[in-house]
Image (cartoon, helix red, strand yellow):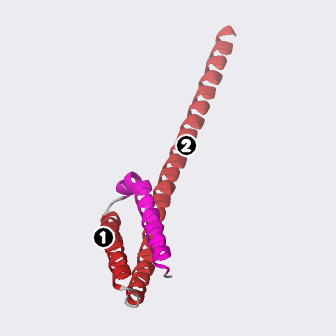
């Protein structure tokens, strides 16, 4: 009788551990799947952010190019001295714009890891370029 109870107790304990083990394995699989989904989602967010940034930067550069052309046309009406100073500033701005365009092209062709590395730097670069551009237009009283 004692032996039967002992066997019954051992069997019940083993079943309980087996059930717990299966539940633990299922939980581990679920957690693994959730982690995989989170990583995938994060990668998609990074890519989306990169693509959104590139689109915004390209739109900004396009607008800047149009306004620079317009500013150059308006400079023709300014005095020679004012025109020379403005052209010098415009050339400097164009150089920075071209440098940013090269960085943007490099970023476009790069992977997600590169975006993570240069994200803040690229965003700061675009903001700096916008600010310089806006100050130049204010200085020239154009735009």
Q: Residue at horizontal 48%, vertical 49%?
A: 36
Instruction: Evaluate whether residue 42 shows in this view.
Output: yes
What predominant SS class does the magenta segment belong to? helix
In the rendered image, residue 120, in percent from the top left (x then y), is placed at 44, 54
Nearer-N-terminus badge (2/1)? 2
Helix, strand or loop for disc 1:
helix
Quadrant of residue 85 in the image? bottom left
Q: Position of residue 131 (x, y in %)?
A: 47, 66
Q: Give the magenta part as a residue range.
A: 112-141
| Residue 106 belongs to the span the image colors magenta | no
Q: Residue drawn at (44%, 62%), measured in percent from left and top?
A: 128
Residues 118 and 136: in front is 136
Q: Residues within 10 Å of mark 1 (few under 14, many from 20)?
A: few
Foreground: 18 or 122?
122
Q: Which residue is mark 2?
A: 31
| On-image quarter of the N terminus | top right
Which disc number belongs to residue 95?
1
Provide residue 139's location: percent of width, then percent of height: 47, 74
Q: Residues within 10 Å of mark 2 (few under 14, many from 20)?
A: few
């Amino acid at each position: 009788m004692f032996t039967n109870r002992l066997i019954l107790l051992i069997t019940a304990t083993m079943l309980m551990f087996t059930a717990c083990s299966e539940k633990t394995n299922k939980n581990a699989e679920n957690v693994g799947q959730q982690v995989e989904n989170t990583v995938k989602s994060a990668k998609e967010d990074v890519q989306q952010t990169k693509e959104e940034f590139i689109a915004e930067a390209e739109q900004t550069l396009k607008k800047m190019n149009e306004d620079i052309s317009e500013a150059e046309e308006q400079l023709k009406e300014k005095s020679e001295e004012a025109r020379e100073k403005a052209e010098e500033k415009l050339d400097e701005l164009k150089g920075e714009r071209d440098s940013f365009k090269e960085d943007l092209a490099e970023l476009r062709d790069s992977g997600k890891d590169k975006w993570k590395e240069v994200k803040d730097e690229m965003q700061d670069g675009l903001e700096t370029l916008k600010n310089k551009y806006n100050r130049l237009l204010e200085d020239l009283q154009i735009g």
